[in-house]
Image (cartoon, grey):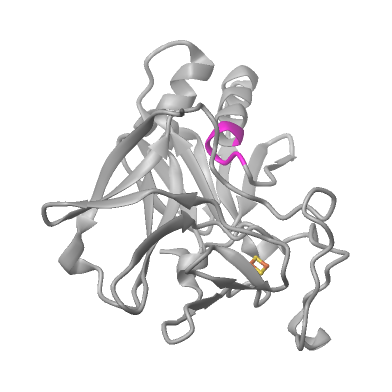
Amino acid sequence: MTEVKWVEVTDAAELWEGDVVDFEVDGEQVMLAHLAGGEIKAYQSMCPHQEILLSHGDYDVDNSELTCTGHSWKFDLTSGKGTNPVGSELYSFPVKIVGEKIQIGIPQDGKQHYCRFSGVSAGVPEFSGVPEAQGVSMTHTEEPVTAEKRVGPILRGIDADFCDAIINAIETDNPHSDVEVDDQGGYVRITTPWRCRLTRKAVEEELGTDFRLADIEPNLAGFAGRIQFGDDEIVWHLDREA
Ligand code: FES
C-alpha cells in the first residue's frame, strides 16, 4: 500500500460550506471543497482539460457541481467525476481533520497526482446541452492557449548552459504544462499557459550546486504576466490566478 504524507493545510473553521480553495501541497495543486452537509473533499485543482485552476470555477453547492472557467466542463464534487462531458475524472486525495486542522494526504509514490483527460484512454466524452458557442470542441482538447494567456520569464544576457538549466527546471516544476521557449538571440522567452513556477530546488538539481533565486534577477529582462518572488520559488501568473 502506498505510503501517504499528511500535510496540514488550513483550519477547519476557515473552510465554509460552499468554499472551494486551492492549495499547493507537497508540489501538487490540490483544491479542498466543503460540500453541503459538511463533507470535505480534496481533488486535483488543475482541470483535466487544460491547465486552468478549477478552484477559480463556479461551484454550485446545492448540486455539488463545479464548472471550470475555461470551457465550462462540469464536475460532481461528491465523486470527482465529470458530468458534462462525462468521461473525465479528478484525482481524489484523502482528507482528514485532526483537532481543528484539515490535513491532505499526498501519496509518496514519486508520481504527480493529476488525471488529464485523454480521449484514447478514457473514451470519447459526450457533452449534453452545451452549445458550440461555449468554445468546447472535444476533438480539439489540445487547442493552443493564446499568447496573452501564457506567462513566464524573459531572460537576457544569460549563459547558454544556465539558460538550459532554467528551461529544464521550469519543465520539472510545471509537469503538465506546455512549456514554450522562444529564443530570439538577444533574449529568451520561456512561457507556460496561465501559471509558471520556478523553484530553487529544481534549479539546484539542474546546476548541481546551491543557487539563490535572487541571482536570476540581473538576467530577468521582463516577464509575461504578474510575478510573485520568494526565496524558494518564483511564480508568474495571470491576474485571475492570483
Ligand atoms: S480548461 Fe477546464 S474546461 Fe477547458
Could you tell me residue 175's position as x and y percent? 60, 39
Vertical arrangement, residue 3 with respect to residue 59, above or below:
above
Relative depth, front residue between 50 and 36: 36
Could you tell me residue 87's position as x and y percent? 73, 63
Q: Does residue 51 appear left or right of residue 92 in this picture? A: right
Q: Which residues are magenta?
A: 171-175
Rendering quarter of residue 190: top right
Vertical arrangement, residue 211 with respect to residue 88, above or below:
above
Residue at the spot x=48%, y=18% of the render?
205
Residue at the spot x=57%, y=21% of the render?
162
Indicate which quadrant contains ligand 1: bottom right
Within the magenta stretch, is there residue 174? yes
Residue at the spot x=35%, y=26% of the render?
212
Vertical arrangement, residue 150 with respect to residue 239, above or below:
above
Q: Residue furthest right?
A: 139
Residue at the spot x=48%, y=38% of the render?
198
Count the marks: how many?
0
Q: Residue furthest front?
A: 1
Could you tell me residue 154's position as x and y percent? 58, 44
Relative depth, front residue between 194 and 114: 114
Q: Quadrant of the C terminus?
A: bottom left
Q: Does residue 192 appear left or right of residue 92 in this picture? A: right
Within the magenta stretch, is there residue 207? no
Magenta region, mostly helix, strand or loop?
helix
Relative depth, front residue between 65 and 194: 65
Q: Residue furthest left?
A: 99
